Structures are given as structure tokens and as C-alpha cells.
Amino acid sequence: MTTRYAVWRLLQVLPTCAGILLVGFLLIHAAPGDPVLALAGDGGDEAYYERVRNKFGLDQPLVVQLGTYVANVIRGDLGTSYTSGRPALDVVFERVPATLLLTATALALSTFLGLAAGIAAAARPHGARDALISATSLGLYATPVFLVGQLMMLLFALRMGWFPVQGMTTARENYTGLTHVADVAHHLVLPVIALAAQEIAAVARLTRSGLLDELGRDHVRTARAKGAGEVRVMVKHALRRAMLPVVTLVGGRVGQLVAGTIVVEAVFSWPGVGGLMVSSVQARDTPIVLALFFVIAMTVVLANLLTDLAYRWLDPRVRYG
Amino acid sequence: MRTTAVPEARRRAVLEVSDLTVEFETRAGRLRVVDGVDFEVAQGETLGVVGQSGAGKSVTMLAALGLLPSSARLVRGAARLEGVDLLQLRPKELRNVRGKDIGMVFQDPLTSMHPSFRVGDQIAEAIRLHDAGVSRAGARIRAIELLELVGVPFAARRWRDHPHQWSGGMRQRAMIAMAIANGPKLLVADESTTALDVTVQAQVLGVLRDVQRETGTAIVLITHDLGVIAEMADTVVVLHEGRAVESGTVGHVFASPRLPYTAGLLARGPSRSRLRPAAPRVDSGPVLEVRDLVTHFRSRSGRHSDVVHAVDGVSFDLHPGESLGVVGESGCGKSTLVRTIVRLLHPTSGTIRFEGRDITGLAGRDLREVRARLRIVFQDSFSALNPRRSVGDIVAEPLRTHGRHGAGGGGRVRELFEMVGLQPDLSGRYPHQLSGGQRQRVGIARALALEPKVLVLDEPVSSLDVPIQAQILELLERLQRDLGLAYVFVSHDLTVVRRICDRVAVMYVGRFVEVGDTATVYADPAHPYTRALLSAVPITSPAERGSGRRIVLVGDLPDPAAPPSGCRFHTRCWLAFDRCVVDEPTLQRIDAQRVCSCHLVSPIEAASIGESGFLP
Amino acid sequence: MADVPVPELTGRPAHHQSWTAVLARPAGAIGAFLVLVVVVGGIIGPWVAPNDPFSVDGPSLAKPSLSFPMGTDALGRDAFSGVLHGLRTTLFVAGGVAAIVVVVGMSVGLAAGYRAGWLDQVLMRSTEFVQVLPRFFLAIVVIAMFGPGLRQLVLVLGLSSWPLLARVVRAETLSLREREFIEAARADGSSPLRIILRELLPNVVPSAVVVVGLLVAQVMLIEASLGFLGLGDPNVVSLGSLASEGQDFIRVAWWLAFFPGLAIVVAVLGLNLLADAVTGSLGGGR
């Protein structure tokens, strides 16, 4: 991978970010009613609305408004939450760590387990193990995140009592240090599995089909003719290119994974951005909703950037231009 | 000169295959693809395994190496490598044989190499798999040495490249380097030169011969090409429908084939003695006149500014009822030329006149009208037919677009099917339900639908087996006779062109370098490139081995995005001198039959070129 | 196009064989059956449903039984009727989104693939941009600003879901364009529109069907998730909102959360199986 490509790809992010801002801006103005409602939320008083009107230059032509809007966003000013009276971005970032912990753990787990399951299935295609893995992943892939979460909660928290039912920490205790970490990890298990289930299935399915495709190719025959063993053929020769669609999938599904996180947070009352988002929509606290949208959209853009770089590293034939 | 075989007493069998039988599980039940095959190959010898596609050639060797696909089943037999039956080995033991005692070179070097790994590393892997004691760096150095051995220039620098950055010939050399990395006792080359141009094929065969001379390895050469066998093999085994129908020394089998099948295979193979009688010339003026045709396009890959000089100043006339062959290596611009002539591509400059009318700038209705009588037939019959339409529908399509598919349209389609020798009741079938030869007939029927005057044929038989090729060529000859068609016949296969064409044009990097009467050009080629091209064609019979001076060109075709200065051939020409580098020769008449562009060939007096035409 | 294949020449229509091949596979047959159950249940179900989903018909929190196959909720409403009405909502959203996706995705994909150059560049940059937008959150922003409602949901999901289809169709078109039968059609004198409709489109349809199937399955999951979060239209029953209501009673009445979720599984599984079967028969058919 050349640095030139990386820089060039990085520059490509800028128009995308601009586009996302534009979508936000257009929605504000397309929304029914006074755009100030969309910018400031539903519950302010007239004086407050007047200040927001001035700040975003709502009496100016639309193009000027767009400029003001973009300038504000670049400064990190995404408006003020009327429910809490604090800057929207601050409110959002407060909740990000909990969500990030959940999403990142699930992403890592699903990629790892999905690859492992896919390899296990492809190693002996159409065998019993393959049938089991394929059927399970097909079923999991079709199951909505909340159903997995509810069933897990019912079984492992309510019936068996192995895991806590909800929350991120045990409310009555005030753990610190390692016990705190262990407590969080204990709370993390069920939400992460619920969130990862669908992703594991998706990765496993794609890994399996990609590997079977690669294993039928001429260059794999060459590797065998060289005397390479089956493990080496699988891991070094076939997996490399079978990973290509998987990388695309994982990168492309980050948006859905975050969406799944929101749902899982609702099932397990996890104190992440999900609850904030739902309550803000219901209270029409639009600055928070927009701030969340921008933060998540930027995350997705970043994930796509990383995907492209990884893809190019895996397949040197990809041209740029 | 090569000795035909090592004397019997000193022969030591490296591989003995006996009673090998393999079956495939198919939807239609068990299919026996290899049935009781026996053969052996001795140290320092080359065994040719011949047969048509589907005869079981490759499966035989894959079975011996335990590389059969999962749908195949070994029924019985033995494959003894120096006495050890490979078929009885456990997988781990067999792995130690593969790549060490037996090296394999496959057909398509691009797909056979891992696209994501560097060429040098892939060779180094072959070394380290069998000798864990070699360090990474050591294996790399050895890989570079191997690349040099097989004639890869600048190996010390280019081992870092990925396969897609190399040409086909260079990639196949790298595959050979990989196969010989551990000094194998046996080298198996499975259709290893089939995908290559004749000039490059000659290079690669030369590399195989050199390797054998230096290492004394036995070679099994699997091919459908009898010329390659005649050129290379000591002994030969002929497979037909999974059975070894004939075997023996190559001289013996070629001279007196025992079975009619082998005789048929040999008779249809290339032969230098067959020549087409020249067609009677009709002097009604040319039907197609091409002048100074240039087609450039922007390179899709690489740097953006590259302009590919695909066709760079081509002129010729085509008279009614005659055939002009266009030959050259792949990438020389043949396909671009024919696509420009039928206006699928837009020429950069130059003129095309058809039936006396300038069609270079035509568009819309006028162009469609011309396209009725100036038709094209494509190479790959599978790719040229829409898989989702019935073949009858495909043949009817030009009738529809030209509004001639009225009530009687079905009758015309039936007539066309009969004309090309197809059962009319096949018209409801889809392309994948037909054989390759039948599909090509459908392509020809589609081209004939609108009663054309000129057919442009782009490698029309290249993807077919030799006996099918012969049938299609017969059909084309008959159609030409019956319908008075003129052909522009593009092919990389010089033997096919000789059979069907009155005149031949040799193309090199976008230009014609020699144009003339087929008999004259083949008998006495004037341009060094024509000489090299003809000499690279494999001989027909082992008796001809060493009969003529073989010219093996070095290197590959130059990049048409950066054609060489002066004479474009000077980079590969063994006769080039100073002037060739700076001064570009023009096509000049060198005798009554032809023109040629080379500084070494002197033109006849300018005065003797008549006003009548610029080409014969 | 005006021309129809000549009857005496054509055998069976071009797609006939492929669709029987799809149904001949176990995955295809099961998938088709599941999709059929969902479609029939969603369209006809609400008319023949035993009870109104909003009316109180029985005891509170009754277990699944013959009269209440999926039990009743805390207010004694019939859960089975709720699921049937929820399916209808799911189908409405899925169908609307599919229509938008097919129209936009196919046009963009065919145009970009067939006409290389600046048009392709512009279309593909736009496609990439839309693909990066997180659909789920875009939908939430729209709900926050325009209020909840099925119409805006269909619009926002439709207008943000087409990029995958466009990219697949474009890639297919690009590889088909290299095939010589497209050149042959040009040499036959066919117009670009005729080539796109008669030569390209029939070859693109199978993979487009697969993609649309997968996209619709995703949209069903998104719609359910929005309902689960309480962001759906409060005036219609949604499988997601049923599951969310069931969550509150999960200790005492598991069936309230389970059956709405199961309905989604059936729909999504059916679509995925069908897509798998189409993909499989495409690979083996040629």
C-alpha cells in the first residue's frame, strides 16, 4: 500500500463529510414549521429562539445560512440541548464511552468468531459440522437483535441467573479497580453476545462462501502442487483473498452494528447513546439528535476509510484513479 | 539436433502409470474419465500426452499427484515414482513428493499464481516448504537465481512484482522456476503453452528443453497441440475418451499411426503441405478500402496520460470474393483493427470505404444500413451469444433491427440454420445447451442474416478443438464460394490463415509489416518478423525437427502505449542496425506479390509499381 | 420493446428454467414457502383475523391456546391479531422501499455501467456517498423532525437503500459489456436503449433479485428496530412495538415478546433462503 494512496483516500473523506453536513442542513429546512424549531428543539422560549435565529442567521439567504451552519459545526458547535441546557456535543460525548465499549467488543468478537466459524465450515464443506454452522448462521442472520437479547435475558439472566438483567454496573455496590472491571465485564456479556450474534452469522456465511470460492481456484491448486499442507493452503493462500469481501462487509456494516447497539441498549438498559437518542427524539430535542447523527455518520465514514485501506493491502491489484 | 530416445538399456523409468482408472460423480451418474491408462517416462526423456479436450489428459496427472477435485474418485491403478506407488501414500508423504520430486506447470499462469503475493516469494515458498533449513533470505536469493535460469530479465529487481505486473510468457517462466525449485525428478507441464503466442510458446518450450538438458529431469507434456509434441516429445501416448489408444516413440506414432483415430488427429493437425488454391480474381474494384487507419485510445490502466497506439496507420484493399488474413501476436492491434473496420470503435483518423462509399463518419440510419452488409463474427462463441436468449431469437435479432423480420422471418431463420449446417429444431435452445462448434455456427448464421458482402472474422476458430476447427473452416470456405463473400480473417494461428486466405497481412504493434500473396509469404517470408513468426510455428512431424533454422525472438511485444522509435520491431530484431532505431521503414513493393517494410529488404524499382493499386 | 419472440422459434421463455431450478433447491422451496406465508398472512390476515388488535377480547396475559394462538397481552388483547396487523405494516414498508430501490438502483446501475465516463463518475460518487449514510439514524433524524409516519419512513429508507443494488447492477453491466454479445448487438444495428433493455436487463435481473431480496430483509429488520425503540407510527401496529411491549412482561408472559420476533425471523429467513437459492442456481446453471 502506498502512502500516496492513503493520503489520496484521506482527502476523499472531505467531500463526504461536507455532504453529510448538507444532508443535515437540508433536513432542518425541509422539516415542517419554522427551521428554528429543528435547530433549537421544541421547548425553548421566544428570547432563546431569537438568539438561535441570530446565531444561524435565519434571516439571511439560504446559501449564507449554509455557510454559517457549516462554520458552527466545524467549530464543534452543534447547538444546545434545551432539555439539559448544555452543548449538544458534550451531552453526546458523555454517553459515547459506554456505547463504544459495547460496539467495539461486539465488532471484535463477531469478526473473530465469524472467521473461525466460516473456516471451520469451509474446511470440510457439506459435512455435519458445515451443516450445523451454516444452519445456525442462517437462523441467527434472520433474527432481530431484540429477539436475541430478550431470549438471552430470559434464559441466562432470569431463569439461570448467571448474568445481571440490566445496566452496566451493579447499582448498589460501588466497586473500584479490578472489581469494577470485572463487574462491567459481567454486565457486558449478554448485550455483547446479543449484538454480535447477527454479525457472527454474516461474517461466517461470507467467510465460508469466499473460502469455498478461493479453494476452487487455480492458485490453490498450485499451492498444493508445491507441497503445501491443507492448513497452510487454507490460512495462507485461500484466506487472504477470501477476507476481501469480509473486510468490505465488516466495514460496511458498522452503521448497522451501531444501530443494533441502540436496540440492545434498550433491551438491557445499557447507559449508552441509545437511551439519549430515543428520549431526545420523543422530546424533539433536535440538536442532540443531529449531533448524534453527525457523530455516528463520521464513525461510519472512518470505518469505510479503514476498510478501503485494508482492502488495498490485501489485494495489491486494486487500482486507484 | 536431438536424439529421439535414450537407448533402451540405459533407460530408467521415473514414472510408471499402470491401469489408472478415475471416475467423476456427475448429476447423470458416474462418468469414467480415465480408463485403464498405462504409460511411463524415463529420466531425461519427454513424454507427450495428447488428446482432445475432455480426453482425460489432465486428470491422469492430477490423479497421480493426489490433486483430483472432490467429485473425482480413484477406482484403481498405480502411479510409481521410482518404484513408490504415489496412490498408496498417505497425504503427508504425498505432500513431500509434490513440489519436490514432481514439479507442475499449469495452463494459465495468471490464475495459477497467487495474485496477492510477490512472484519471488511464491518461488521462495516452494523452496522453504521442502527445506525448513533455508532462511527467508536464502530462499529469496535462490528464487532470483531460478528466475535468471529460466530467462527472466532483471530478476534481482523484478522478483518484488506481483504476477499481474508481468506478461504471460514471463509468468509462465516463473511457474517453471517454481516447479524446478527443488530439482524435481519429473516435471509435468499441463497445456503450459496453450495460452501463449507462438513466439512466446517457442521461448517457453526452449526454457523447458534447457532445463531438461541441465537437470536431466523427465518431462510429461500434456497438450492438444500435435506440433508441440512433434517438436518436444520422445515418446507419446494418445488418449481418447479416457483410454490410451496408442503409444510409442514419437517418430513411430507420427509416421505410422496404428488406429484411425490417431491418423485422423494427425491429418487434421497443422501441415505445411496443404495450401489453398488462389481464388479467381474478379476485377470489379475493391469492396472494402482502408486507408491510413489510426485508432488510439486512452489507457485504462497505469498512468492517465498513456495513449495506446492500437492501430497506427493501416491500409489495405479487399476485393469481392477474396480473403485477407491478418496475423500477429496478441496485443498487436488485430482486434482493434477489425472492430474499427465494422465501426464498433471510432477511428482516430484515416478512412474506410465500403462499396465505394466513405463510411468513416457515418452514424444512425446510414451506419445501420451499411452494417447489414459488413458483418462481424466473434472469437468466443459463448461470450458472443446472449445466454438468456434462444439461439433462434439471436439469429432473428438482426432481421428485427433492420425491419426485415415480418411474417416470413421464421422461414428466413430456418433457412439460415440450414445454410450453416444446423438442425432448425435447435433454434429453441439456449447457447449453453449447444456445443462450441454449434455456437460458432449460430454466430455465423447471425452474421449472414442480412446477406452481407464482407465478413470480418475475429479469431473465429481459436476457441475450438482441432477437428471442429476444420469443420468450421470448411463451412466458411463453402459459404464464400456459394455467396461470393469477402473475408477479413484475423487469427494468431498461422496454419489456419494459410488454409483459408488468399492474401495475408502481418501486423506488429499497430502496423502491417508485410502484406502479400499467402503462398509467397509463407514460402519466402521477407520481413524478419514474418520469418520469426513462421519459424515459431511448431512443426508437423518429428522428422522435420531441426530441419530449418529456428528463430526464437527475445522478449515480449512492446507496450503499444509506448511504441519503439524507428522500426517498431528493432527491439526484438536480430538483424537490426543503427538506422532501424531512428528511421521508420515504410511499406514498399518488393515483388509482384507483396509489400514489406524493412530497411534490409530492397524495393523493386518505383516505376514498376502501377498506378492501378497500392497493394496487389 | 414492440418485438415479441416468434412463437415457432422460441421454446420456453428465458427465465422459465431458472425459476424452476430455484424452486427445485430445498432452500428455494422453503424460502418461497416462508415468504408466501408472510405475504398471505400480511395481506389477507388482517381481514380474516379473529379479533381487532386494539380491542379487549379475553383474559389478561393468557397463555397461547386454541382461541388465542399467541396468547393475550396485559389488557387482554389478542396477540395473534396483533402480529397479523404488524406483518401488514412490515410488508407495506418493505414493498414501498423495494419499489423505490428497484427504480433508482436499476436506473443508476444500468446507466453508470453502460455509459462509462463522466456520467459513471458522477453516479458512482453519489452512490458511494449515499451508501455511507447510516440509514437507521437518518431515519431517526427524519422521524425527529417530521414526526413518525409510514410514508416518510418508506421514503427515507427507500432513498438511502438503493446504493447496493446500483453497485451490483453496475458491476454486472460492466462485465457484461465486455462480453462480445453486446458488441454483436451493436453490430446488428441495435440502439443503446434496445441493448440495455433486451441484452443487458435480462442478464442483470437474477442478481438484482438477490440484492433486492437481501435489502428488503434488512429494511424489515430496521423497521422492526425502530418500532421496538418506540419510534414507529403510533397509529399502526408494528411487530417491533409489539415486541417492545412484550419486553415489560418478559418474566411472566414470554410469548408476548417471542411471537412478534418470530414473525420477523420467518420473513427475513424466507427472503435469505430464496436469495441463496437464486445465487446457487445461477452459479450452477452455466
Image (spheres, rainbow, N blue to C red):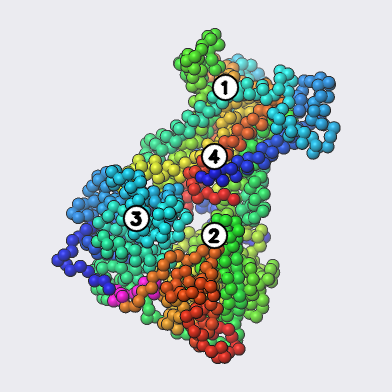
Q: Regarding mark 4 in the picture, which secondary structure is present there? A: helix
* Residue in view at x 63 percent, y 48 percent: C124
**Dot 3 alpha-carbon crowd within 10 angstroms: few under 14, some 14 to 19, many 20 or more:** some
> Is residue B150 found inside the magenta-colored segment of the image?
no
The amino acid beneath tag 4 is: Thr
* Residue range of the region highlighted in magenta in the rendering: B535-546
Q: Share a chain, discs 1 and 2?
A: no
Discs 2, 3 touching: Cβ within 8 Å: no
Q: Name the foreground residue: C201 vs B355.
A: B355
- Residue underneath mark 3: B145
Q: Position of residue B71 (x, y in %)?
A: 35, 49
Tag nearer the camera, 3 or 1: 3
Tag nearer the camera, 4 or 3: 3
- Residue underneath mark 2: C179
* Residue in view at x 80 percent, y 26 percent: A52
CA distance for labels 4 and 3: 38 Å
Q: Share a chain, discs 4 and 3?
A: no
- Residue underneath mark 4: A307
Q: Regarding mark 3 in the picture, which secondary structure is present there? A: helix
Q: Name the foreground residue: B490 vs A209.
A: B490
**Dot 1 alpha-carbon crowd within 10 angstroms: few under 14, some 14 to 19, many 20 or more:** some
Q: Name the foreground residue: A13 vs B51.
A: A13
What residue occupies the far top of the structure in this picture?
A172
**Dot 4 alpha-carbon crowd within 10 angstroms: few under 14, some 14 to 19, many 20 or more:** many
The amino acid beneath tag 2 is: Arg
What residue occupies the far left of the structure in this picture?
B9
